[in-house]
């Protein structure tokens, strides 16, 4: 790519259908090698940012994303150009476009294969415009294998997962899922049998409850919990241990996690000096702590609930609730309360046929009484954002407006 020429973005409007994904692979290979334009992975590209153009010699019309601002300008590195632009889920506010270099994506893929014990065939069961799905494609290109692709046009189903797995041909198989998908798979015997075929199943996007990990282990499924984000080219901590080359530091004041290393993204489109990227590190919004050499994720710092003057961290409470019989998923949020400032409210999703727990059972499951939920609501499903993160804002709105199952 000529020095001083900002890379153009080749827009890829992904539909999660097998044939569309396979059309993207050549462009991704070119972007990783520096021989093609950067890919803008999104299904929400404004019309004002597109420009139709014809591919030389083919007559095929492509859509080139024209950024509203220059792509980092002089801050871009011609020797290691930006390969992809990935849209964040917007969990911290307005979604941003993360600029990730080829070297960061390739370093992440290589470190993943090293940690898992070798390369293999991957099954794409997540939207490819999100970093977890994109990395399935990158790892496949690095491994020289053809990825299996689950058709998500009509959403994720255990039956569809089993069918997509049956089409895989290699002996060493990998896939990447979010916890909600694992919960649904383990409720279906055929899909559970399919999940056992995988050498490892990466689980990220949201915290996997200890009860879910235990159940998967009992079923003979190897789940590998991952922590990371678009800004770190995907998961960079596996089962609490950073991938090779990844550096984790914790702020002394609040335990905020800072991440550095070869998988770090270049920055945000239009905001090369964003404060989230400081001194070669990405400053997260997450709280962490070390225990027995492993990183424990305490949850987002901005999700801490202040109830009666006590700081309540949702993560440990959610873990306790998912250990209750019949509780498949749980999310804890803070709601406005005249007496407590914020009251701790819990939303739970039940396994099929399960009897809902009582609020007394929920409160008894929490070791610290002052952190125990004062409101319980049973939902059919949790609102999600991005590839599978619970949408805490939407959940709080539901719990604030809907009559609770029980409250004190």
Image (tube, rainbow, N blue to C red):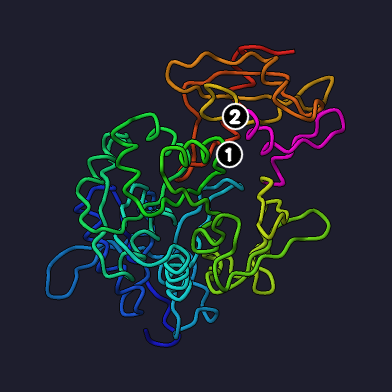
Pick whichever, 96 or 159, lies toward us: 159
The location of residue 265, given as percent across then percent down, is 53, 68
Q: In the image, what residue occupies the spot 28% across and 47% down?
A: 15
Q: Earlier in the sequence, mark 2 or mark 1?
A: 1
Residue 164 rendering spot, x and y as whole percentages: 24, 45
What's the mark number on residue 210?
1
Which residue sits at x=45%, y=69%? 114
Q: Which mark is residue 282?
A: none
Q: Residue at x 48, y 35 (%)?
A: 215
**Is 269 included in the stretch rendered in magenta?**
no
Whether residue 364 is visible: yes
Counting other residues with Cα less than 10 Å from the Cα at mark 1, is it few (<14), some (14-19), or many (20 or more)? some
Q: Is residue 14 above or below residue 154?
A: below
Q: Give the Cα distance between marks 2 and 1.
A: 8 Å
Q: Quadrant for the C terminus, please.
A: top right
| Residue 158: x %, y % from top left | 32, 34
Q: Is 20 on the left-hand or right-hand side of 358?
A: left
Confirm or deny contact between disc 2 and disc 1 (CB under 8 A). Answer: yes
- The residue nearer to you, when weighing 169 against 378, is 169
Frontmost residue, 306 versus 136:
136
- Say which element carries label 2: loop
Residue bearing the label numbered 2:
323
- Give the image quarter of residue 317: top right
Q: Is residue 181 visible?
A: no
> Mark 2 packing: few (<14 Cα in 10 Å), some, or many (20+)?
some
Q: Is residue 251 above or below residue 75?
A: above
Q: Quadrant of the N terminus?
A: bottom left
Q: Residue furthest right?
A: 309
Rendering quarter of residue 293 = bottom right
First to last magenta residue range: 300-323
Q: Residue at x 66, y 65 (%)?
A: 248
């Amino acid at each position: 790519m000529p020095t001083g020429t900002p890379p153009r973005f080749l827009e890829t409007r992904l539909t999660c259908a097998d044939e569309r994904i396979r059309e993207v692979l050549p462009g991704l290979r070119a972007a990783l090698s520096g021989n093609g334009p950067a890919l803008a992975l999104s299904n929400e590209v404004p019309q004002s940012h597109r420009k139709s153009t014809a591919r030389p010699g083919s007559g095929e019309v492509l859509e080139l994303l024209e950024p509203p601002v220059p792509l980092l300008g002089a801050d871009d590195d011609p020797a290691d150009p930006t390969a992809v632009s990935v849209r964040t889920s917007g969990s911290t506010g307005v979604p941003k476009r993360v600029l990730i270099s080829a070297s960061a994506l390739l370093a992440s893929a290589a470190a993943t294969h090293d940690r898992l014990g070798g390369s293999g065939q991957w099954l794409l069961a997540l939207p490819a415009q999100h970093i977890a799905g994109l990395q399935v494609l990158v790892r496949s290109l690095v491994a020289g294998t053809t990825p299996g692709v689950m058709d998500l046009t009509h959403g994720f189903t255990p039956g569809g997962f089993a069918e997509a797995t049956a089409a895989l041909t290699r002996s060493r198989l990998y896939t990447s899922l979010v916890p909600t998908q694992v919960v649904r798979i383990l409720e279906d015997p055929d899909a559970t049998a399919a999940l056992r075929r995988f050498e490892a199943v990466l689980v990220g996007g949201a915290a996997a409850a200890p009860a879910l990990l235990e159940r998967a282990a009992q079923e003979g499924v190897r789940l590998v919990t991952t922590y990371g984000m678009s800004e770190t080219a995907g998961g960079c901590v596996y089962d609490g241990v950073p991938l090779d080359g990844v550096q984790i530091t914790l702020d002394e004041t609040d335990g905020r996690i800072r991440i550095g290393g070869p998988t770090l993204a270049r920055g945000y489109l239009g905001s090369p000096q964003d404060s989230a990227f400081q001194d070669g590190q990405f400053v997260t919004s997450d709280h962490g702590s070390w225990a027995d050499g492993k990183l424990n994720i305490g949850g987002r710092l901005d999700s801490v609930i202040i109830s009666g003057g006590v700081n309540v961290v949702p993560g440990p409470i959610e873990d306790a609730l998912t250990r209750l019989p019949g509780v498949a998923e749980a999310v804890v949020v803070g709601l406005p309360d005249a007496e407590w400032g914020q009251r701790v409210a819990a939303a739970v999703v039940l396994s099929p046929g399960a009897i809902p727990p009582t609020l007394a059972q929920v409160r008894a499951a929490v070791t610290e009484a002052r952190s125990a939920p004062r409101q319980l609501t049973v939902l059919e499903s949790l609102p999600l954002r991005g590839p599978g993160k619970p949408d805490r804002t939407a959940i709080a709105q539901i719990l604030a407006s809907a009559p609770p199952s029980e409250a004190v």
